[in-house]
Amino acid sequence: MTERTSKKQGFKKCRSATFSIDGFSFTIVANEAGESHHRPLVRFARSRSQNALCTAVTPCTGITDGKGILMDPRSTEEILADELPVPDEPDAMEKTAIRLRCLVKQLERGEASVMDLKKNLEYAASVLESLYMEETRRLVDPEDELSDIQSDSVPSEVRDWLASTFTRQRGLMLRRSEDKPRFRSIVHAVQAGIFVERMYRRTSNMAGLSYPSNVITVLKQVDMWSFDVFALNEASGDHALKFVFYELLTRYDLINRFKVPVSALISFVDSLEVGYSKYKNPYHNLMHAADVTQTIHYLLLKTGMVHWLTELEIFAIIFAAAIHDFDHTGTTNNFHIQTRSDTAMLYNDRAVLENHHVSAAYRLLQDDDEMNILSNLSKDDWRELRTLVVEMVLATDMSCHFQQIKAMKSLLQQPEGIDKPKALSLLLHTADISHPAKHWNLHHRWTTSLLEEFFRQVVTNRFIIYFLLHWPGTC
C-alpha cells in the first residue's frame, strides 16, 4: 500500500491490529510506550476462527509459528548481531532459543562461524545455569512434575553428581537427609545439555566429518558390548575406524579439551585407514582397530573407569586403541624374526610389530603438520600421552599375556593403589582379544578372518622355504 493511499484511508495509530489470511485471524499488539528496540517484535497466534485473538507478550521475545516454535522476522545476521542480554533477564531463554535456531540455519547452509557458535553456546550454557539456579531456589512445590522418575531408583551418588556437575555448587551435595529429592531442574538441565551437545556435534560434523543417516543408526549401538562393527563398516563405505574414532573423541569432549584441529583429525584418521588397508589383511585391518576402540569405550563406560581416569589418560587409551595395529603386515612377530625382515632388524627381534605400529603412527604426526592432532598439547601432556601410548601398545604383544595377568593379580593383592599404566595396558590387551566373549556371529566372523590371515602366512612361509631351497645361490 502506498503512502498516498494510506493517507486517504485515514489510518490512525492504535495499540493492536487484526487481519485475516487464508481463513486465519492474526492480532498484533504494539510495544509499550517508551520502549526502544531496533525493530518491534511481538508474538502472535493464528486460529481458524475469525474472532480469534492472541495475547501480547513481552516485546522483542519473538514470534511463534503454529507449532509454538519461536521465530523472528529479522534476518539471521541481524539477530546474531544483537548484543547478548543478561542471562537472568526474563526473556533470555526465548532469545537464546531464537539465536540457536539461527545458528542451525547457518549450519545447514554451511555458513556458520565458529566464533559465533562458541559465543552463543557459552551464553546458552550460562542461561541454563541461571535458570537451574533460580528453579533450585524455588523448590517449594510439594509435587514432583516428573512423576515417571522414581526417587528410590536413582542412587544418591548420581543425584549428587548431577547437582555438582550442572550447578558448579557442591553445597547441594550437603542437602539434609529429610529433604525430599527434586529432579525437575536436574533433568531439564540434562535435557538442555543434550541439546547443546547435539548442536556441538552437528557443528563439528559440518566443519569436518559428515555422518550419513545409516551410520548414525548403527552408532546408536556404540555403547553395547557386542557392537556390530561390520555393519558400521558397510554403512560407512569401509570407514568404520574413522567414524568410531571421531565419535568417541567427540563424546568424551577430547577434541575441545585438547584443541584438536578437526581438519588434522580427519587427515590423520584417513591416513590411519590407508595404513590399515595397505596389506589387505583379513583380520588385522581397520575394522579390527575400530572394534578394539569401541570395546575400550564400552569397558571405560560400563566399569566406571572413566571416572577414575584423567581426560589425558582417556585420550591416550582411545588413541592407542586406534593405532595399536597400524600398518600391520598380516604376519606374526615370529615370522618377522625367522625371515630376518627389516622390521625385525630395526627393533632387535623384540615386540617387532608393536614397536612398528607406534613408531609408524607417530611418524604420521611428526612428518605432516596438517595431520598432527597433538599439536596443541603442552609439552608435559605430550610426553605423558606418548609414554602411556607406547606402554599400552607394546603390551598388546601376545607373548606378554601371562606375564600381564600375573602382574595384575599381584597388584590387586597390594594395599596401595593400582598402577594406572599397567591397568590401562591390560585393558587394551583385553579389548584386543575380546571377540570370543561377544555374540557368536561376531566371534565366528572374526575367527574365520583370523584363520584366513594365518593361512596366507603359511602359504607365504612355504613359498620362502621353497625359494631358499631351489633358487640357485641362495643357500
Image (tube, grey):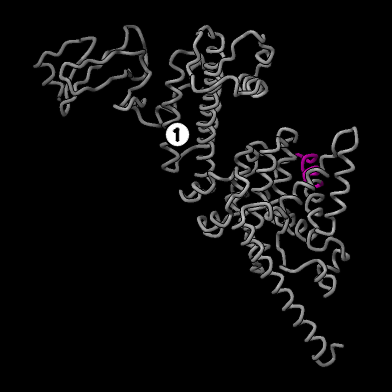
Res 162 quadrant in image: top right
Most prominent secondary structure in the magenta stretch? Answer: helix
Residue 370 visible (yes or no): no
Q: Is residue 209 magenta?
A: no
Name the residue carrying label 1.
Answer: 103
What residue is rendered at 14% in x and 13% in y? Answer: 11
Task: Pick the quarter of the image with the C terminus.
Answer: bottom right
**Depth check, front residue: 90 or 171:** 171
The magenta stretch is 378-387
Residue 474 visible (yes or no): yes
Residue 332: image x %, image y %? 78, 67
Res 336 quadrant in image: bottom right
78 displayed left or right of 247: left
Residue 243: image x %, image y %? 57, 50
What residue is rendered at 53% in x and 8% in y? Answer: 138
423 displayed left or right of 25: right
Q: Check the image and report above or below for 384 versus 31.
A: below
282 displayed left or right of 17: right
Residue 320: image x %, image y %? 73, 50
Q: Check the image and report above or below for 113 versus 368.
A: above
Task: Pick the quarter of the image with the N terminus.
Answer: top left
